[in-house]
Amino acid sequence: MKNIIHIYSDIKIDKFMSQLNLGCEFLIRDISILKKNFHQDNGGIIILSKKESFENLVLTNLKKDYIIFFNKNFSKTYSKKNLNFIKIPKSINYLKNVFKSFVSDLQFEFHDILIHNKILKNINNALEIQLTEIEKNILIHLIQEKITTKSEIKETILNLKSEIQTNSLESHLSRIRKKIHKINSLIRIESKKENLSIFNL
């Protein structure tokens, strides 16, 4: 089951969001839904291009974590613990990285494991173990893709050129497998030449 990211915007962003391919589902809604009686438990992303949209936003109703993109010409600013304000315009790559970071902080569930805040937990027995940032990103990538390549992980997560010969990825995979085993999970990661897959026994 894919994670659902709630996005509220006063502009059309469907085409941009469809290009991100982050392994989750985006539920895009009009900004007008953020009114006084609004309450959203899951947090989300707010994109504001019009000053009136910003001024009409009722920030006190946003109980969970939100990222708010707003026009750099808006003079009104806020300071609230669970809100992260980012002035736009920004480059496309910058926006993509923000969305990737937001998605990576979500809970990811796959059969008997749950990943959240660099903690790998077995849902069935409550055993848990700490992951490094790279281990977490590799595992989430595998969960999202199910089948991927070593070259893709090297380039997108380890920032290595695919042709570079290194045992770095194999070392990370070995540690991930050991941690999965320590919490008695039935999840397995399989390597077949260049391909990697994750599955449940």
Image (cartoon, rainbow, N blue to C red):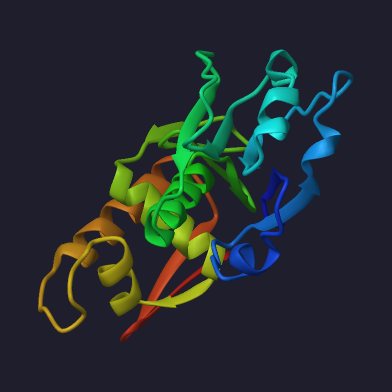
Q: Quadrant of residue 63?
A: top right
The answer to whether residue 110 is seen in the rendering is: yes
Q: Is residue 179 above or below residue 151?
A: above
Q: Is residue 147 above or below residue 80?
A: below
Left or right of residue 92, residue 68 in this image: right
Query: The C terminus lies in which quarter of the figure?
Result: bottom right
Residue lying farthest to the right in this orientation: 37
Which residue does the image show at 51% across and 19% down from the upper left? 77
Is 188 in front, or is 110? Answer: 110
Query: The N terminus lies in which quarter of the figure?
Result: bottom right
Q: Is residue 112 above or below residue 34?
A: below
Q: How many marks?
A: 0
Q: Is residue 33 above or below residue 29?
A: above
Which residue does the image show at 73% across and 46% down from the upper left? 10
x and y percentages locating residue 145 in the rendered image: 53, 70
x and y percentages locating residue 4 in the rendered image: 71, 49
Which residue does the image show at 66% across and 59% down from the upper left? 13
The answer to whether residue 201 is seen in the rendering is: no
x and y percentages locating residue 51 in the rendered image: 65, 33
x and y percentages locating residue 68 in the rendered image: 57, 34
Left or right of residue 108, residue 54 in this image: right
Is 120 in front, or is 65? Answer: 65
Left or right of residue 157, residue 187 in this image: right
Is 66 in front, or is 181? Answer: 66
Left or right of residue 98, residue 145 in this image: right
